Amino acid sequence: MNIFAERIERLRAWMSGNGWDAVIISGSDPHASEYTASRWQQIAWLTGFTGEAGDVVITAGHAGLWTDSRFFIQAVRQLEGTGVELHKTRVPDARSIPEWMSGKVRTVAVDGLCLTAASVAELEHYGFKVEDVPDLLSCIWHDRPGIPSTPVMTLSEESVGKSRYDKLTDLRKFLLLRDCDCTVISALDQIAWLLNVRGEDIDYNPYVISWLFVSQSEAVWFVRKDEDAPDPDTEDSFQELEADGISIMQYQDIVPFLKEMSEEEPQKIFLDFTTLNHTLYRNLLEAAGEENILAGTSPVPLWKAVKTPAETEGMKEAFLEDGAAMEKFLFWLDTTVHSGRTVTEWEASEKLTSLRSSIPGYRGNSFPNISAYGPNAALPHYITPESGSSVIEPHGLYLTDSGGQYLFGTTDITRTVPMGECTYLEKEDYTLVLKGMIALSRAIFPRGTAGCHLDVLARNPLWQRARNFGHGTGHGVGFYLGVHEGPQDIRQNFNSQPLLPGMITSDEPGIYREGQHGVRHENILLCREMERNAFGSWLCFETLTLCHIDTSAIIRDLMTADEIEWLNGYNRHVFAMLSPKLDEDVTAWLRSKTRPV
Amino acid sequence: MNIFAERIERLRAWMSGNGWDAVIISGSDPHASEYTASRWQQIAWLTGFTGEAGDVVITAGHAGLWTDSRFFIQAVRQLEGTGVELHKTRVPDARSIPEWMSGKVRTVAVDGLCLTAASVAELEHYGFKVEDVPDLLSCIWHDRPGIPSTPVMTLSEESVGKSRYDKLTDLRKFLLLRDCDCTVISALDQIAWLLNVRGEDIDYNPYVISWLFVSQSEAVWFVRKDEDAPDPDTEDSFQELEADGISIMQYQDIVPFLKEMSEEEPQKIFLDFTTLNHTLYRNLLEAAGEENILAGTSPVPLWKAVKTPAETEGMKEAFLEDGAAMEKFLFWLDTTVHSGRTVTEWEASEKLTSLRSSIPGYRGNSFPNISAYGPNAALPHYITPESGSSVIEPHGLYLTDSGGQYLFGTTDITRTVPMGECTYLEKEDYTLVLKGMIALSRAIFPRGTAGCHLDVLARNPLWQRARNFGHGTGHGVGFYLGVHEGPQDIRQNFNSQPLLPGMITSDEPGIYREGQHGVRHENILLCREMERNAFGSWLCFETLTLCHIDTSAIIRDLMTADEIEWLNGYNRHVFAMLSPKLDEDVTAWLRSKTRPV
């Protein structure tokens, strides 16, 4: 029996002993994070599936993983032999977990720490009897890692453009307007942004695992404090925060603190059920009473998404440095592969990381590099294996999707690189995807326009030939924070959040042909004011990404004069910006690569 | 004192006698119609405003009209001297009627016949005390017209592709699936479609003012029956319906019928609150009890929107006949204006109507002709005055938006006609709007795509120059039914209804420059299946409208090769289809007009 099948059997034994019909294991953590620390990589431990999005349901007779199209192929591979079946989400006629469980099970055990209050409320709405068992999996996961605790750093007001005092003041005003006295923030990116703090508790995301309580009179940060062996940098950070009126308490003290507060003087609490975990909510509900809770959407994601001028400047610097590293990488890849030396996807990925890591202020990658050659690039979220990865050959398409975390910003870039001769279909796909990326970059739109209004611009060149891609076109990008952030996005769903000046969003159409090739072009766009006239107030995008787009795979006849002009102008700009940062040989190579078509 | 101001004062006297703080007068009728019979043109009678969309609120100190951007300019003109103030809807920061009344008034009298159950529920939700006074305005409107009663005709199963029996069977299945025994349909277009009947009770809309009760065992049509002087055609229609198992009762017997039914054997009733009027709902609630009512969305609009092959064929015939009339009109306009004879907007409008009315099967226009020259075309819903309308000069742009009702379909077409020399701005606007219309016509999109996803295609050429238009891009068009129908549309709002094969929708971008000119190009599009491949199931549009697009105002350099190809192909197709129906002189003229650019 496969190790995962065996773990699932152990869980089933535990379930039957407790009278649970089903257990739901979520892919998230107590803070509703997208990326999690190893302690909360429960699905990987239980089933072997390592995608960032997924939930598992175990019943006596069935084990299922619910995940979306980004991970279908990966899930099928990784779940082989585990007995876990794939349930596709975000497809027509998809059945959600509660829909699937309806009629099959009654008592459902959940780790309420890792499910949001909103998702447990949905389960209860469906009529299930939900048992909240915090850290449920610990019953069978004996060597489970602890909660991480890494050094805490602060960012200066100068670098982020707004002090934590001003941010907390905005939050307090928001609460007052809703007749609330206080709130608990549990989303780690919101806490990091509000307090201007960063940590390393989670790979790729510079967060500090913590809770933040904010009332009209106080702010308390519940965070992992190592009282036996305090880290000096962390202590400095804590002192800086305390000087700004923020109390520091131990992470686990949040529940007793809230209980005590509610007993002494009940206050009206504002809570966002889409990020608050169920266990914490249950405790709060018990302590404060339903009449003292107001549910709503946290304003912090929107505040965070609209970058300050200082953050925008930082992001521009990040894309400049990151672009130079990308060009060094592409030069190395081109010359090495064509020198006849064998380069694997893994080696290329490591090379790129090493080039990024030499940038001053580099703090890590913003997500796992995707380094995919040929048919591997047809998996939008391909995981490059450390051993046995494919060799990059001097023909066809290589795709690299990667990004860095820097003290002054976060980057995310995809380039599809023609390694030599390409088939007509590869070139056609390459060109059509590029046309879509250019069309979205060039969009001009009135205030009030949401991403789902613009999404078709990036898809239309593909749609015109009955081709498409199964993922969104754009996601928000944080400032030295998560590489994926909301509330805006550019995709087909009906997200009504308008795009606002200062928002930074990706533009990444693609196409994926299983067993053949994959193409994705990704630039990052800053939304800017353009003009105001009789027809309204107009916005546009400025491309932040600086890295040339290879013209060798372009079918010129498929492009309009405007598109060619954009492409030549972009490559010219890239050369002008990056060549001062590159060695002579790379500069010469880049000059030839950016020659106008 | 202006006659309208005087009527409002009389209403105020009545209000104060009854202790009402406010009265709401709606622009609709007991069937939630867009166009109404004269009896329900209450806003026109009370305020002089004749736009099709609007609601009026009268309080002791204020009289206000709420309407949207289509009618702003018209409202300002028509309300002069009445004391009625314009409240703009669908603009940023617009305040709805309940929002505006909040804190100002407590008791609100409404004519519950002309407000939907949903809108009165909203008023009650805001805390107003609502008094339902059916036919409220009759207290001061002494010569108010009666309820119209025109001949009733039936359409054959052959011409519409589906029998009333099959349609009622679908409806009964729909009810059974929801554990409902019966429903009351009050929307006139839904009744006309379900029963395959048409009438002339309302200008432009071939409806019969009536109610339809459908249960698992019976169907009763409550309709105006003239028992003293029965119309023979109507009697034939009634007999045909009765042969199909549909009972005919008097219009006003709906309430006693429902009461009796509820007393004898209470049944579960399905109701759509967005079309059911409040008075009828109140009676039903009293008779049946809340526990026997299920609120939901009527399935009929969606069934009606997806045309049968027979309806599609009929619509194609309608556009062929209508297109020939349009070409005759455009030929007459061109030659007459250039002969030096004075032609006014009104005369042109009358000429067009007379050409349409000679088509066999013509039943009237599908909405009031818009015939607008020069700055008048800057009003998207310009009303051409019978006397004193502008002269159409041999330069600049003339706009005609019109349509016909035929036994075999409904048409709607807009052409902007360059009458001679045009300014660069006129040409540029003309070309950019045309580019948008073409882009939407050429769209190819996967199943599941909604109109709001495609809307930007029609706007993007304008947006690229920071220009826009303030109305939707497309509305559904009925089959010898309303020229505006849902549930699909193509506009910026988040209507999630996907476009489906068989739906017929307009494509009408425009641009309006107050005091200068207006441009709108409108074709009607049929949604069709295209292909199925690895990327999904693909849909496209087929243009039904047949009438050439004038190329003399086009700035060729603004158009892509694809757009030019589309335009030449369209004009070639128009000539091929229409020339067999045209006289020699018109054919020769059309040949020159459709010469490729």
Image (cartoon, coloured by chain):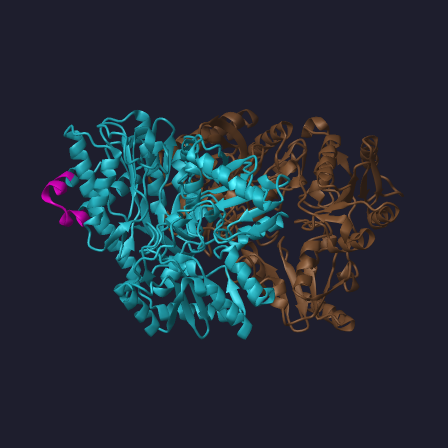
Chain colours: A cyan, B brown
Position of A265 compared to A381: left or right?
right
* One can see residue B520 in this view: no
Residue that sits furthest to the left in the current view: A584
| Highlighted range, magenta | A576-589
Q: Answer whether residue A583 is magenta in the image.
A: yes
- Quadrant location of the C terminus of chain B in the rendered image: top left
- Quadrant location of the N terminus of chain B in the rendered image: bottom right
Q: Residue A56 placed where, x, y %?
A: 49, 41
Q: Residue B570 placed where, x, y %?
A: 46, 31
Position of B352 compared to B573: left or right?
right
Q: Is residue B526 above or below residue B112?
A: above
Q: Residue at x 28, y 68 (%)?
A: A236
Q: Main secondary structure of the magenta part?
A: helix
Q: Answer whether residue B297 is magenta in the image.
A: no
Q: Residue at x 10, y 43 (%)?
A: A584
Q: Quadrant of residue A588?
A: top left
Which is nearer the eye, B306 or B171?
A: B171
* One can see residue A183 in this view: yes
Q: Residue A536 placed where, x, y %?
A: 43, 57
Position of B273 compared to A215: left or right?
right
Q: Residue A196 placed where, x, y %?
A: 33, 64
Q: Quadrant of residue A141?
A: top left
Q: Is residue B314 above or below residue A240?
A: above
- Total of numbered circles in the picture? 0
Which is nearer the eye, A544 or B279?
A: A544
Which is nearer the eye, A226 or B508?
A: A226
